[in-house]
Image (cartoon, rainbow, N blue to C red):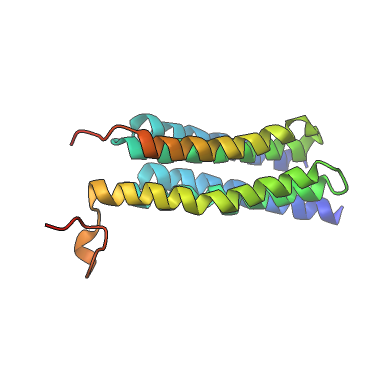
Amino acid sequence: MTLVWTASGVMLLAAAVLTTYRALRGPTTLDRLVGMDTLLALTICGLAVWVAATYDTTVVPAIVALSLVSFIGTISVARFRVRDDR
Amino acid sequence: MIADVIAAVLVLTGSVLALTAAIGLVRFPETLSRMHAGTKPQTFGMILVLVATLIRLSGHPDGGMLILTGMFALITAPVIAQRVGRLVYREQRTGEDLLDESQLRPRG
């Protein structure tokens, strides 16, 4: 079982690194926004895998809070951001 | 034991989905196609991992909060996709030549 959790953790970490590359590199603000949104989803997945691996349920409220914060953050950036100069 | 195997399969599927989405996010050329790739782990992959966690925590009271997280993800994903997709279409006009008629195109 440890192999399963380690493998999924490594895959999620690699996904997070690639997503961070897109968030840093992305030519427009919207690319960065999509990258950050995906990064938050990956964080939630990682925390859920941690809970499943260790039965440590102290981070479960953090999972719920993160899912709401990612929604609020993405929507407010999409609403209030400054347009890119093209 | 069988529940553990099911949970392991679900977690691995969700992680592979997340990895492919990240590769698509890096490799796809336009913002809209990047959005298409990036929203895959946001709903389906996350739900798979949450179901696996729910199976592992069966009977624990914190399982309800995981169900709540899955519901939030399903409710908020369309709103985010609509807002961001609208902005992307307005500013970048990707694939506009493929459309017969666009109701978002400004008139005049």
Is residue B39 shown above or below A21?
Answer: below
- Where on the picture, by quarter, is residue A77? top left
Q: Nearer the viewer, residue A83 or B6?
A: A83
**Could you tell me residue B99's position as x and y percent?**
24, 66
View extreme (bottom): residue: B100
Counting from the top left corner in percent of width and height, residue B73 is at: 59, 48
Q: How many marks?
A: 0
Please, which residue is most extreme toward the front here? Answer: B108
Residue A4: percent from left, percent from top:
71, 43
Residue B71 is left or right of residue A56, and the answer is: left
Residue at the image position 56 percent from the left and 41 percent from the top: A41
| B16 vs A60, nearest the viewer | A60
Regarding residue A10, the answer to whether it shows in the image is: no
Give the answer, above or below, for where A31 lies relative to B74: above
- Seen at 22% across and 70% down, the residue is B100
Residue lying at 77% horizontally and 48% vertically, measured from the top left: B54
- Which quadrant of the figure contains the C terminus of chain B? bottom left
Residue at the image point whose x is 65% and y is 40% from the top: A7
Q: Is residue B84 visible?
A: yes
Q: Percent from the top left, x then y, of residue B10? A: 69, 53
Report whether A42 appears left or right of A28.
Answer: right
